[in-house]
Amino acid sequence: MKIRTRNIIFIMLILMLSAGLLSVSSAYYKGTGFTHNIPDNYYDSYSQQEILNKYNDTYLTAEETAVCTKVVDGDTIYLSNGKKVRFVGVNTPEKGTAGYKASKNFVSKLCLNKEVSINVDDKKYTDKYGRTLAVVIVGGKNLNEMLLKEGLAEVMYIPPSEFSPYVWAGNSTSSASASTGTSSSNVATGSASTSEVVRSTSASDSVSSGSYIGNSNSFKFHTAGCSEVDRMSDKNKVYFSSKSDAINSGYVGCKKCNP
C-alpha cells in the first residue's frame, strides 16, 4: 500500500511539473526586459540606401559573406552558409514585447534575402546556444552600431569580446548590465555620425585627441605615452575618446601610467 501511494504521489508531481513547464514555454521570453516605443512601421517609408547613407563605412573587414535567409528578431539572423548569427554587443526586444517588430523590420529591410558580411568576435566565437557572435556588415556599414544609434537596441557587453559596443552607442542608447540585466528604453535618434573605435596607426594622433589606448588581450587601458603601448601589438590596440569610455567597455587602468 505504501509503495502504491508513493507511486501515485510521484505521478502527480510529474504531471504538475509538466503543466508548469508548458505554461512557461507558452509565454514569451522577456530577456533583459529592454523595450522601446519606435512604431513598427517607422522605417517603411525609408529605402535601404537612405538608411545606409546616414552612416559612415566601418573599419571592420568582411570575413565571411552570405545571403541572409531568415531574420529571427532584431539581433539574430540565419545565413545561407548555415550559420545562425547573433549580433555581438547588442540586444533588441524579445518577441511579444514593445519594439520587437520595429527592430526586426529594420533588420529585415537591410538584410533579408540580401548579401551580408560578418566579422566574427575573435575573443568569443559563439554563444552558449551555438550562434556565431559577430558584427553584421551591410553595404559597408556596421549594422550592430546602427541598431544602437537608431535606439532599436541596447548595449549588451559580455566580456571577453573583441568589440566595444559602448563606443558604437555613444550616449544615444541605454545599456544592459551583463550581471543584472537592467535596462531602459529609448527612441530613434537618426544620428548620422558614427562612434566606432578608430584604429589609428599614429600614437601622436591619440595624444592630440586625448584618447586612451586599450589592450584587447589584457583589457587594460593606458595613456598614449605609456611605455606599455610601445610593447603592444597594433592589432590589439583599441582607442577610446575618454577614460569613461574605456571603463564602460570593461577595461581597467594601467597601474604604471595611472590613466
Image (cartoon, rainbow, N blue to C red):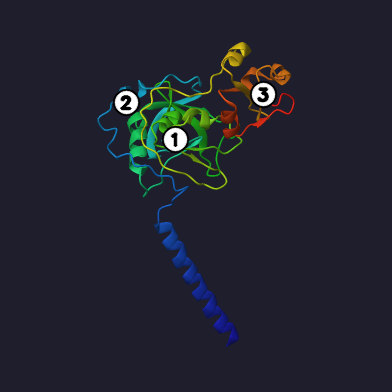
Dot 1 or dot 2: first in sequence order is 2
Dot 2 or dot 3: first in sequence order is 2
Could you classify mark 3 by the number of other residues whose Cα lies within 10 Å: few (under 14), some (14-19), or many (20 or more)? many
In the image shown, does 56 or 48 lie closer to the viewer? 56
Q: Mark 2 highlights which residue?
A: 48
**Distance from the alpha carbon under mark 1 to that under mark 2:** 22 Å
In the image shown, does 258 or 51 lie closer to the viewer? 258
From this view, report whether residue 214 is shown above or below residue 20.
Answer: above
From this view, report whether residue 9 is shown above or below residue 19.
Answer: below
Could you classify mark 1 by the number of other residues whose Cα lies within 10 Å: few (under 14), some (14-19), or many (20 or more)? many
Give the x, y percent position of residue 117: 45, 26
Residue drawn at (50%, 46%) of the image: 182
Q: Amino acid at mark 3?
A: His
Q: Quadrant of residue 6?
A: bottom right
Q: Mark 3 highlights which residue?
A: 222
Q: Amino acid at mark 2?
A: Gln
Q: Which one is closest to the eye, mark 2 or mark 3?
A: 3
From this view, report whether residue 137 is shown above or below residue 14.
Answer: above
Q: Amino acid at mark 1?
A: Thr
Give the x, y percent position of residue 72: 39, 41
Give the x, y percent position of residue 234: 64, 18
Dot 3 or dot 1: first in sequence order is 1
Give the x, y percent position of residue 30: 44, 51
Q: Is residue 24 visible?
A: yes
**Distance from the alpha carbon under mark 2 to that under mark 3:** 40 Å
- Marks 3 & 1, CB-CB < 8 Å contact: no
Count of numbered circles on the image:
3
Q: Mark 1 highlights which residue?
A: 173
Q: For numbered disc 3, what is the local secondary structure? A: strand
